[in-house]
Amino acid sequence: MSSSTLTENALPPALLSALQKAVGAANVLTSRNETTVYDCDGMTLHKSLPGAVVFVSSTAEISAVVKACNASNYPFIARGTGTGLSGGTLALNSAVVIELARMNRILEINVSDRYAIVEPGVINVNLTKACTGHALHFAPDPSSQGACTIGGNVAENSGGPHTLKYGVTINHIIGVEAVLPSGEIVTFGGPAPLSPGYDLTGLFIGSEGTFGIASKIWCRLTPNPEAVKTLLAVFPTVDAASHAVTGIIGAGIVPAALELIDKHIIRALESWLHLGFPLDAGAVLLIELDGLRDGLDSLAERVMSVCNEHGCISVRAAKDSAERLLLWKARKQAFGAVGRICPSFYIQDGVIPRTKLPAMLAKIDALGQKYSLIVCNVFHAGDGNLHPIILFDERDPKQVENALACNTEVMHTVVEMGGALSGEHGIGLEKLEFMTMVYNEDDLEGMRRVRDVFDPKRISNPGKAIPSRRCWEVAGHQPPSLAFGVKKMHG
Amino acid sequence: MSDWINTFSSQFGDAVCSDDASLSAQSVQGKVPACVASPDSEEQAAAMIRFAASHKIAVVPCGGGTSQGRCTPPPKSFLALSTKRLNKLIHHEPGDMVATVQGGMTLKEFQDAIRARGQWLPIDAQEQATLGGMVAKNANGPRALGYGTLRDMILGMTVINGDGVIRKCGGKVVKNVTGYALDKMYIGSFGTLGLITEITFKLRPLSIDGRYWSEEVAVWRDALTTMSAIGAKNLPIEMLQIIHPLRNEKCSSKLFISAAGTESELNRIEYELKQSYPQFQFNGQFFDADLSANLSGYGTQSEWVYAMSVDSAKPEAVLLSRARQRETPGATLRFGCVSSKLVATLSVLNAWENAPLSIGLNGGIIDLSPLTDSEAARISSEFEKLGVNFAFENVVGVNIPNRWGSPRPEWAIMKQLKAALDPQGIMNPGRFVV
């Protein structure tokens, strides 16, 4: 199922010529056969054909391409590897996609000062791999870290399981060189602290490509913990597991990671990876503790005690590094494992207070029953970042309609519980319609004013991140998914 | 009395003071405001700012008054906008380790309230500083080593911008990418974008145990190598500082380390320190009444007990009080550098061997007095060559045209952001880099 624009939209000739001059004709794709590969990101529900895909290899080339788009008042969007889940790199209105994958060099690793300088196309996990031997790593670890780029992490303020203890991307970026929508190249922050003025590095991160394009990134490197202990706690129900999560946090324990995986995902993973996961479990908690080895055993005992208080069937520690890595492989590839259950699914990203976790999961379960859909859960329970995965058959319009309606009700519940629409996937296009649930017109106007400073022409990923129209217009619309018109791929 | 003051007073009643005593009490860097306003609600504060905007009156947000000297003096005529009545704890959810508080609450009041439920905010600031002021100045000190900075602890904020409109950003959960991170922009904006009226913080559980190690050193530079080496060891310590005497020149300097955790963790840290640095004793002390014997000459016992347990901004506070009593021209220099350049950075300050200071791995603060214009210019120039960020604060009797260094290209964007959110340019005009 897709909502592709089926016709090729030709770029203005002057723009096409300028793009070809900037990077060479061989690095500019315009035919539909070539650009269709870039018509969506991880949010496959929506597709839009780019006007062109331009491969860049340097900051200067990014600047030249952006200047060309600016001169033609033409929209553009940067793209890394297209793993985003909110339609952030969807090329609306035939935008020019500026593909950064070739800018994948690690420019410097400064071990003594604990930072690295990278190009935006560096794959997240590759930075940590490059630090092997220095006992350092790049802490933000999204599940897609084997594929996503650090430039994309910056755009979305990506998270991951270990953000519970170590923070999200914004806590690990100390400077950004950016190409503004004017084509101007500026630098925010840097390795030395106390940069004078406003924290433009912090402001830029999570701006979803609407303020410009990060062309160079200073990443803080985190020392590896001396010791790690990974626990797997098995619970009879999701409810028991969620109460254990609130119990752990309520006890003042901050694990390095605290993930919940429910029975649907357990079964999908077990049929694939054969980890020995209990198939009759309602849910498991993957709990990681790290730090000095001297304190770890007593901390693990405290955690196990809380799990037992909340009715866990069993709790054990991974016996060695190999088992630990396998457990994390299971967790980080859980989304992919969903494909064994159902070909189409819709992943959400709301965040709620940890204290509301049991109630929220019960509500999600009830909504699944209401709409006759299976909803799986595999998520960052420790910081309340949900990932309900709504399963449906895209060939059945009724299921599609139900999936979208279920999504809307889940979002409403998240907001009612005092939560946030997105913890790490970003607003993109997908959640734009819900922004007026959490921000009023004054709030959004303030954000628009800030956006106008960076992008007065609204050419840098327009139509994403924040509603550009008055809220009443947005609130009155149907969800974009339906407004776009869901079409069958075949027939 | 100016016309606008009459109108302002009649519109806002007893929220406004214009008697001499009140004005003097709220003076900022020796300048007396035209009027002092203490709104009792966000709506009233917003109306006051709208009034100021329409009459083009400069507004200086005032909290605990601990850090006004970090900026340049206010303009000749200004409205002092006090947050003292916006001082409530709105919500504390211990189970989620989140609290929402009004900007006018002091750090001490806040810490006392949440400490009762086993939590705290690990930020260095003086106890009478308000939380809004702490955010506006991006309060940070020695504890940044162990806990990070406010950027890592703030979840959301409500700010009344210079157009008098109340706007919120962020949220109340510990992970959030909904909308732009305007809260990050407001941190360290020194009141130039608006009045911070409400902040939501991510809290920490109080640690099970805490210990400090304080070692005398005859010459503080001799401890630099040890401090750097300890920093490289990746021990979970919260503070690592060299402190040079702040009051009594006869006292030696201190290498100060503190950590929090379980007894086994603290024992391990102490073991590592003793093994690696046998020239020091590193006998750990607990945060209790015995502090005075170890820190004599640094203030009263009660000051330091509280200082080392919560308010680790005490060195800065003493430097500030020293600045206020200054009889010779001088300034407090705050600087930040990468750790590998710390020695080179401090070499620029070779002539200031006996100046009171507090430094960590990535910079610190030093009191420079008597300071000449040319010496300030020399330090600025050398620091810029080294890539050191700095700010001259609490400046008295010295002409320092660029207190934050030479203008940088990105400041143009900051000016535009200010113009966007403070169209009339009334919020702390001319007091910061923009």
Image (cartoon, coloured by chain):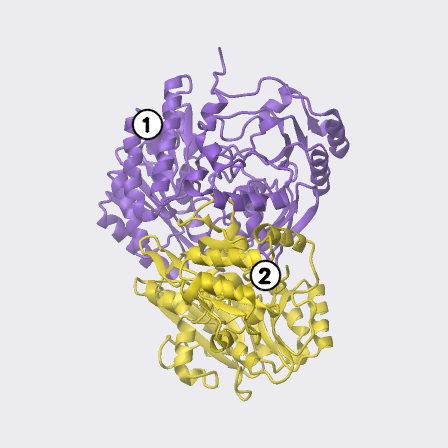
Which residue is identified by label 2?
A: A193
Q: Chain of mark 1?
A: A
User: Which numbered disc, 1 or 2, marks the residue that appears first in the sequence?
Assistant: 2
- Quarter occupied by residue A422: top left
Can you see residue B200?
Answer: yes
Q: Are marks 1 and 2 on the same chain?
A: yes
Q: Estimate how packed mark 1 is, as few (under 14), some (14 to 19) or many (20 or more) residues with alpha carbons within 10 Å.
A: many
> Which amino acid type is shown beneath numbered disc 2?
Pro
Residue A155 on image: x %, y %? 56, 42
Can you see residue A341?
Answer: no
Residue B230 on image: x %, y %? 52, 68
- Quarter occupied by residue B380: bottom right
Residue A228 on image: x %, y %? 41, 52
Residue B233 on image: x %, y %? 51, 64
> Which amino acid type is shown beneath numbered disc 1?
Ile
Say which of A291 and B326 sits in front: B326
Residue A300, numbered circle: none
Against B212, residue A423 (above or below) is above
Which residue is identified by label 1?
A: A374
- Quarter occupied by residue A274: top left
Output the letter for the chain in purple.
Answer: A
Left or right of B171, for residue B348:
right
**Numbered disc 1: secondary structure:** loop
Against A278, residue B139 (above or below) is below
Output the letter for the chain in yellow.
Answer: B
Could you give the CA–CA distance between mark 1 and mark 2, rounded to whole angstroms?
48 Å
Say which of A159 and B303 sits in front: B303
Say which of B239 and A95 sits in front: A95
Q: Chain of mark 2?
A: A
Against A87, residue B132 (above or below) is below
